Image (cartoon, grey):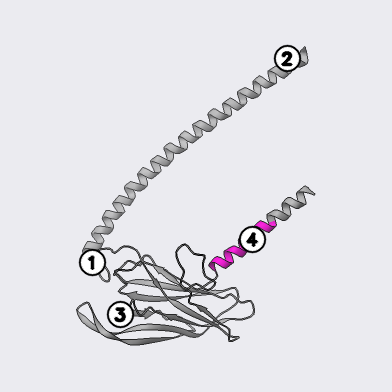
Amino acid sequence: MKTSRVSFAAALAAGSVLVLSGTAFAHVGVQPIGEASKGGYATLNFKVPNERDNASTTQLEVNFPVDQPLTSVMPQDIPGWTVNVEKTKLDKPLTVHGRQVGEVVTKVTWSGGKIGPGMFQQFPVSVGKLPENADQMVFKAIQTYDNNEVVRWIEEPKEGAPEPQTPAPVLKLTAAKGDDHHAGAKTDGAKNTDQDAGKAAGHGHGHDQASADHGSDTTARVLGIAGIVVGLGGVAFGVAARRRSV
């Protein structure tokens, strides 16, 4: 009876973990390839899982924030999918790399393909320049299935509040990295790379040494404790033997 109860509790806990994991991760999201630094350029992946067992996703619409205009948006070609890019004119043109930009992308739509049940698809987009005075960007997305169901991932998550039922994809921005936002000088980049590699190698050596020292110390402690346990066992055995002999 006890074994059955334990097995049932373990199965219930495992099932709960799976259900919660599905709830937390099964929605449209956005992640940069590498980092998305403020004022820089990045490649973003919009990840779209298919959440239905009896329908396939056939369209994704991503809306770009108008209050954080991106002057460069270039979707990657995905076999089997057709991409449509919509732009809007700015009331006040922006100056980017010495030239005037009068319109920006406000929406990108992928259609014609299919994401089957139990599958997901990534939609890469090269973007820039990212905002310099913001910590994140919110991209509202709309997912359409071949049974005409439409899921609107447009609820903006609030800090300290529970995750919304249909959260919008949120891109976290990291600190700016100097002037090397788009196509920095190769010489400086190579020099920095070499320096970073040297630092990383030094750090890795120190980390390995610390790990070795820590491992040796842990081994010594374990052996010491094992010796104490064996010693106590011997004493207990001797006492028991004397009692039996008496």
Q: Between label 4 and label 1, give the one nearer the viewer.
A: 4
| Residue kind at label 2, given as amino acid type | Arg
Q: Earlier in the sequence, mark 4 or mark 1?
A: 4
Q: CA distance from mark 1 to mark 3?
A: 17 Å
Instruction: Say what secondary structure mark 4 lies in.
Output: helix
Q: Which residues are magenta?
A: 11-25
- Where in the figure is residue 211, as x and y percent of width and height? 43, 41
Q: Earlier in the sequence, mark 2 or mark 3?
A: 3
Q: Earlier in the sequence, mark 2 or mark 4?
A: 4
The answer to whether any part of residue 150 appears in the image is yes
Q: Is residue 56 above or below residue 212?
A: below
The residue carrying pointer 1 sits among few (fewer than 14), some (14 to 19) or many (20 or more) residues within 10 Å by Cα, namely few
| Residue kind at label 1, given as amino acid type | Asp
Taking 7 as reference, is 100 left or right? left
Q: Earlier in the sequence, mark 2 or mark 1?
A: 1
Depth order, front residue of 150/98: 150
Q: CA distance from mark 2 to mark 4?
A: 55 Å
The residue carrying pointer 4 sits among few (fewer than 14), some (14 to 19) or many (20 or more) residues within 10 Å by Cα, namely few
Pointer 3 residue: 71
**Residue 179 shows which numbered tag?**
1
Q: Between label 2 and label 4, give the one nearer the viewer.
A: 4
- Where in the figure is residue 147, as x and y percent of width and height? 60, 86
